[in-house]
């Protein structure tokens, strides 16, 4: 099941079910909470009880042209991101699993706009398209063989990053370069875990103004989803609606700048778009970034999944 938050006209945000025909309003079953995030967290907590009633909803579906999809998790309690976490055809041994926390207020949804900060320091901005895990909690000390007990579903996340030199994150690799407002687009839906047989066999794609950049399979993770679940729940309690982004293949990195449209797809989950605006109207080299002053489009071709694992 694909779960969304949506608005229609002046109505408040409701939970819905995304179908090929549009959105089925699920608010008669998944009642509106005090905030949209609480609406979705309550739906996650009560999903197994509510599921028969949700499956019985038959529509009619509201066409997507008549609704506005919101981020399915507009204000997670925690957003945790894996650092790198992809082999990228270069590593001989897995690097230690490492993570950082991203500002929950950075979340925006489909059709929203990434706002580049109007600072005059000489840094640039990049996209990182990532599979994101949606937790059902409280989840603490979950062993990797039990990882499915902690995962409610999956969504798409774009980890927008401020860079200061090469691939170095702004402010000495600090979380600050990841946490500007609008730097965490999430969408278009949460796919329930039963719909995804293996989260380490998904095809991730990302386009900037129709230029393909990220194009990789999640089977290339250094540390797989079960390892991620065990690691993060050893450190902290993950609550319902918390998010962990699984990292990205950096061989698809590129700059983003004013006026561009960013589109992300994870096959089996969905597609969404956001815009970019920059009050300073800066510009950088277009293409796939492999180091300062260089692009390498061969990396995209080399990472393209075959039809067999797409």
Image (cartoon, grey):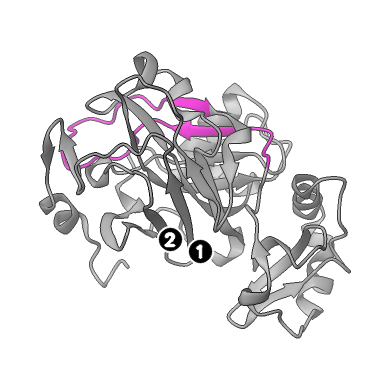
**233 sits to left or right of 33:** left
Q: Which residue is mark 2?
A: 266
> Is residue 190 or residue 53 the one in the foreground?
190
Residue 148, percent from left and from top: 59, 49
> Is residue 69 or residue 83 the one in the foreground?
69
User: Alpha-carbon neighbours of circle 2 within 10 Å: few (<14), some, or many (≥20)?
Assistant: many
**128 sits to left or right of 253:** right
Residue 293, percent from left and from top: 12, 33
Residue 128, percent from left and from top: 37, 43
User: Alpha-carbon neighbours of circle 1 within 10 Å: few (<14), some, or many (≥20)?
Assistant: many
Residue 10, percent from left and from top: 81, 63
| Quadrant location, the N terminus | bottom right
Marks 2 and 1 in Cβ contact (< 8 Å) = yes
Residue depicted at 62% across the width and 83% down the height: 21
Q: Is residue 268 magenta?
A: no
Q: Which residues are magenta?
A: 75-101
């Amino acid at each position: 099941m694909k779960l969304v938050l949506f608005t229609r006209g002046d109505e408040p945000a409701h939970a819905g079910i995304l179908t090929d025909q549009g959105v089925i309003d699920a608010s008669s079953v998944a009642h509106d909470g005090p905030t949209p995030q609480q609406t979705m967290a309550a739906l996650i907590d009560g999903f197994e009880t509510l599921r028969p009633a949700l499956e019985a909803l038959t529509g009619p579906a509201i066409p997507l042209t008549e609704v506005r999809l919101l981020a399915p998790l507009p204000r997670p309690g925690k957003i945790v991101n894996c650092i790198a976490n992809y082999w990228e055809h270069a590593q001989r041994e897995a690097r230690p699993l490492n993570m950082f926390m991203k500002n929950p207020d950075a979340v925006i949804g489909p059709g929203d706009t990434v706002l580049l900060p109007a600072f005059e320091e000489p840094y640039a901005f990049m996209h990182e398209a990532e599979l994101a895990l949606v937790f059902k909690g409280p989840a603490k000390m979950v062993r990797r063989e039990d990882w499915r007990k902690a995962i409610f579903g999956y969504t798409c996340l774009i980890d927008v990053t401020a860079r200061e030199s090469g691939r170095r994150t702004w402010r000495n690799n600090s979380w600050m370069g990841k946490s500007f407002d609008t730097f965490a687009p999430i969408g278009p839906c949460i796919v329930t875990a039963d719909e995804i047989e293996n989260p380490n066999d998904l095809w991730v794609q990302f386009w900037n103004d129709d230029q393909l950049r990220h194009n990789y399979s999640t089977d290339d993770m250094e540390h797989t989803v079960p390892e991620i679940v065990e690691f993060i729940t050893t450190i902290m309690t993950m609550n319902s609606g918390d998010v962990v982004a699984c990292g990205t293949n950096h061989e698809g990195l590129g700059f983003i700048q004013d006026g561009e449209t960013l589109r992300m797809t994870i096959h089996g989950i969905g597609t969404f778009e956001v815009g970019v605006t920059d009050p300073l109207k800066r510009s950088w080299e277009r293409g796939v970034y492999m180091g300062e002053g260089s692009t390498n489009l061969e990396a995209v071709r080399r990472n393209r999944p075959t039809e067999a694992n797409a």
